[in-house]
Image (cartoon, rainbow, N blue to C red):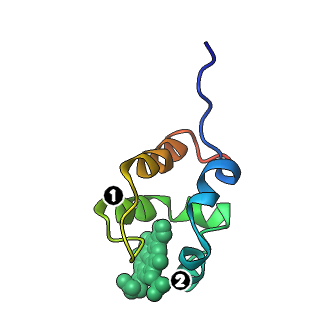
């Protein structure tokens, strides 16, 4: 059986951030830019886990776990 690959930014993570998210957060970082998301990953994870972000409703746990697995996998593009 194939080992599931680490999630990639392009295929798995970037699509989790919609246009409203991306535009709202441009004052601090660009959620559609892998470099920015890497730089702020621990802070982003903390807001997702606490449910503080996105401001209109928290992510399902699955999505938060996917983001965490991407971090654990070395944050590949
Ligand atoms: C370091 C992590 C983050 C910080 C410190 C942060 C901080 C903030 C602040 C201060 C605001 C404006 C005040 C408010 O509406 O509560 C805001 C708004 C918002 N943020 Fe974040 N945020 C973070 C991550 C995220 C992430 C990961 C998402 C999406 C998944 C997101 C989506 C949004 C949205 C949708 C709004 C509301 C803007 C609107 O009115 O449409 N933020 N954020």
In which quadrant is the N terminus drawn? Answer: top right
Image coords of residue 33 (percent x, y): 67, 66
Mark nearer the N terminus (2 vs 1): 2
Q: Determine the residue positioned at 57% across, 76% down.
A: 29
Image coords of residue 45 (percent x, y): 41, 58
For residue 49, the mark is: 1
Image coords of residue 15 (percent x, y): 63, 59
- Estimate how packed mark 2 is, as few (under 14), some (14 to 19) or many (20 or more) residues with alpha carbons within 10 Å: some
Q: Determine the residue positioned at 60% across, 48% down.
A: 75
Residue 31 visible to an observer of this rendering: yes
Q: Is residue 6 left or right of residue 10?
A: left
Which structural element holds mark 1? helix
Q: Quadrant of residue 6?
A: top right
Residue receiving disc 2: 24
Q: Is residue 48 left or right of residue 15?
A: left
Q: Residue furthest left?
A: 50
Q: Determine the residue positioned at 46% across, 51% down.
A: 63
- The Cα atoms of the two marked residues, 2 and 1, are separated by 19 Å
């Amino acid at each position: 059986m194939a080992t599931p690959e680490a999630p990639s930014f392009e295929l798995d993570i970037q699509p989790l951030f919609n246009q409203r998210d991306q535009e709202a957060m441009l004052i601090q970082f660009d959620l559609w830019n892998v470099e920015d998301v890497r730089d702020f990953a621990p802070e982003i994870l903390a807001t997702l886990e606490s449910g503080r972000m996105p401001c209109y409703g928290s992510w399902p746990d699955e999505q938060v776990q996917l983001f965490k697995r991407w971090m654990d996998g070395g944050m590949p593009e």
